[in-house]
């Protein structure tokens, strides 16, 4: 039976390397991204690596609940199981902006897309021998709080505070998800890639924000996309990784996440808010 992996945010940075490494392991790839051209670039690169690669690209705006549900429906129709779901896409946004769903764009793109896509693909993950879910967070969550009003209302918006809060949401969701999946065949992991030189900050509309992020990435990064991708692939594919189900990984090592991230009431509050806003119900 083919091994199948769904990846978001694989047209650049770590996701690009993850796609290539998963393809080397023989996985069928289902990749979600915003740009048709970047999808074609990834396809051609994968074909150069292996002309027999099984690859399909889906275009979607992950900040749109409607788009995430629609792309999940297409993926579900194309497979009978999913072995690994790697929620990797992330974004930073210079200015406060509400999506069509009335959600601040950073939270919509970085958290709600994970929540909605994971829910929508869950039955296919259950149909695998051993399903794996990766939620890509960040150490920036360590200094974050959760202001639910800021999810839908402009309140002294700051690009880094919004990003850190969305990454805390990833960790909170991850811990609650582990409990939800306790009696299933699915393992889930929360992962901080390390300080990696990737183009995420270059997507900002602000010249200042792009410059600061570029300088930080240039002088402060402590690992490469290739090395970081190996940690993703290990958790997504190796049998022994199942023993680490539910843990938070930082640069490949199990670490403690923030004290706030272990607050079960906060985890449940975020879960309930996400269900309500996304119009989904985890049964």
Image (spheres, grey):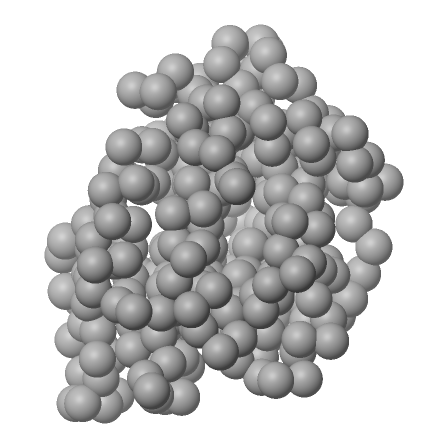
Q: Give the percent coordinates (x, y) of residue 27.
A: 35, 81
Is residue 279 placed above or below 51 in the rendered structure? above
Where residue 168 sits in the image (x, y, percent)?
66, 39
Q: Is residue 78 visible?
A: yes
Residue in front for this viewpoint, 278 or 231: 278
Q: Is residue 262 above or below residue 135?
A: above
Horizontal arrangement in the rendering, residue 106 relative to residue 48 (left or right): right
Give the percent coordinates (x, y) of residue 80: 29, 69
What residue is rendered at 77% in x and 40% in y?
261
Identify which residue is drawn at 66% across, 78% down. Answer: 241
User: What residue is rendered at 70% in x and 66% in y?
Assistant: 245
In the image, 77 versus 196, the foreground residue is: 77
Instruction: Please report the residue visible at 49 percent of the width from the left and 78 percent of the height from the top.
Output: 129
Which of these two is toward me, 74 or 108?
74
Visible residue check, residue 171: no
Residue 239: % across, % down: 61, 84
């Amino acid at each position: 039976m083919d091994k199948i992996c769904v990846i978001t945010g694989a047209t650049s940075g770590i996701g690009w390397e993850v796609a290539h490494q998963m393809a080397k392991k023989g996985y069928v790839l289902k990749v979600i991204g915003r740009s048709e051209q970047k999808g074609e670039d990834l396809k051609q690169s994968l074909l150069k690596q292996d002309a027999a690669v099984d690859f399909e690209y889906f275009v979607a705006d992950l900040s749109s609940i409607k788009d995430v549900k629609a792309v999940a429906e297409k993926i579900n129709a194309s497979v009978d199981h999913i072995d690994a779901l790697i929620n990797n896409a992330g974004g930073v946004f210079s200015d406060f902006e509400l999506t069509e769903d009335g959600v601040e764009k950073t939270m919509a793109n970085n958290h709600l897309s994970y929540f909605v896509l994971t829910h929508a693909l869950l039955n296919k993950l259950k149909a695998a021998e051993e399903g794996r879910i990766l939620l890509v967070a960040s150490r920036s969550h360590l200094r974050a709080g959760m202001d639910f009003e800021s999810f839908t209302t402009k309140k002294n918006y700051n690009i880094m505070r919004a990003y850190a809060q969305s990454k805390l949401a990833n960790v909170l969701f991850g811990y609650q998800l582990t409990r939800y999946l306790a009696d299933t065949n699915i393992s889930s992991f929360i992962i901080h890639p390390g300080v990696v030189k990737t183009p995420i900050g270059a997507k900002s509309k602000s010249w200042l924000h792009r410059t600061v992020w570029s300088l930080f990435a240039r002088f402060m990064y402590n690992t490469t996309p290739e090395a970081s991708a190996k940690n993703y692939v290990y958790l997504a594919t190796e049998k022994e990784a199942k023993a680490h189900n539910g843990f938070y990984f930082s640069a490949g090592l199990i670490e403690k996440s923030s004290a706030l991230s272990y607050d079960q009431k906060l985890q449940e509050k975020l879960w309930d808010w996400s269900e309500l806003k996304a119009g989904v119900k985890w049964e």
